[in-house]
Amino acid sequence: MNKIKFGVRWDTPNQNDRIKQLANKNLIDYIEVNLHCFFPYRAKELDLQIYAHTSHNALASSSGLYLGNAKLVKEYADHVDSPWIGEHLAWLGFCQKGGSLGYLIQPIFSEEFLEISIKNIKFLQNFYGRKIAIELNHFYTYNSINYKNEIAFISEVAKKSECYIIFDISHWIITNLNLCRKIDYGLMDLDHKRVIEVHVAGIRKSKSSNIWHDSHDNIPNQLVLSLTSEVLNLLLTFKTLKAITLEHHENSSEKDFVRSVELIQGLI
């Protein structure tokens, strides 16, 4: 495979020591800072390239965007010179001013929400002065009206708003498991040439049901690794993919964190 950058998610300064050890071994190229975390400016202590990422903007909201939040994101992205800004394509994000329910709520896949999403993304890209890369959360139910699946929807949003896509492989797998689909359902509906970044994390089944969730404190299992390899081989033919991010939790053991890094590095 062609060399792409590899990085890890950063949430708190508690992760700095373990990340620094891997950076010193040239195993990590960047960190993706989850904004609105604790002390995001302390991420610069690692002296690594920083990608800004947020789940607070509701890109598919018909109520409009909260500019106070967007200003904070822009300020940080400008400060660290983030190459793009990761955003979630959600109807409701975590921003309290947007009436947050404490979780990302997905849009209805309709023409109306398509146009709303395009309008909001175009506005934000102009406001930020840099590109947005949009991603979807995982799903427990399906809410399509006019689109055959959520991958087709996000692809059309990205195309018409001229933004990038972050393809979260774990979210994609979890959605297909929860909806009892074929495990690689939707992959061919993805606008491959717009995918600039890939996310990978562990997954787990609920202890009380058959519902699957992502789990940042688990090592990616063989299913995740196998499909990650398949997706990377496909995306690299389009020469747009720039980065792959491992999402890990600060409370995961250092041993599991290092092992996860090694497993993903083995696919690049």
Image (tube, rainbow, N blue to C red):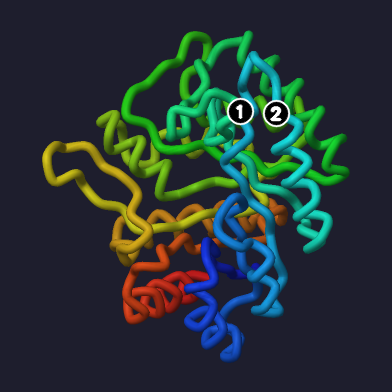
Question: In this view of the protein, can residue 2 be seen by the observer?
Answer: no
Identify residue for label 1: 97
Callout 1: few (<14), some (14-19), or many (20+) C-alpha neighbours within 10 Å?
Answer: some
Please report the residue visible at 78 percent of the width from the left and 41 percent of the height from the top.
71
Q: Are marks 2 and 1 in contact (CB under 8 Å)?
A: yes
At numbered mark 2, what does the secondary structure look like: helix, strand or loop?
loop
Please say if 214 is above or below 32: above
Identify residue for label 2: 66
Three-letter code, disc 2: Tyr
Q: In this orientation, which residue lies closer to the viewer: 142 or 50?
A: 50
Picture quarter with the C terminus: bottom right
Instruction: Using the image, tell me which numbered label, if any, was put on residue 70.
Output: none
- Residue 9 drawn at (x, y percent): 53, 62
- Residue 170 drawn at (x, y percent): 40, 49
Lower sequence index among marks 2 and 1: 2
Q: In this orientation, which residue lies closer to the viewer: 180 or 32?
A: 32
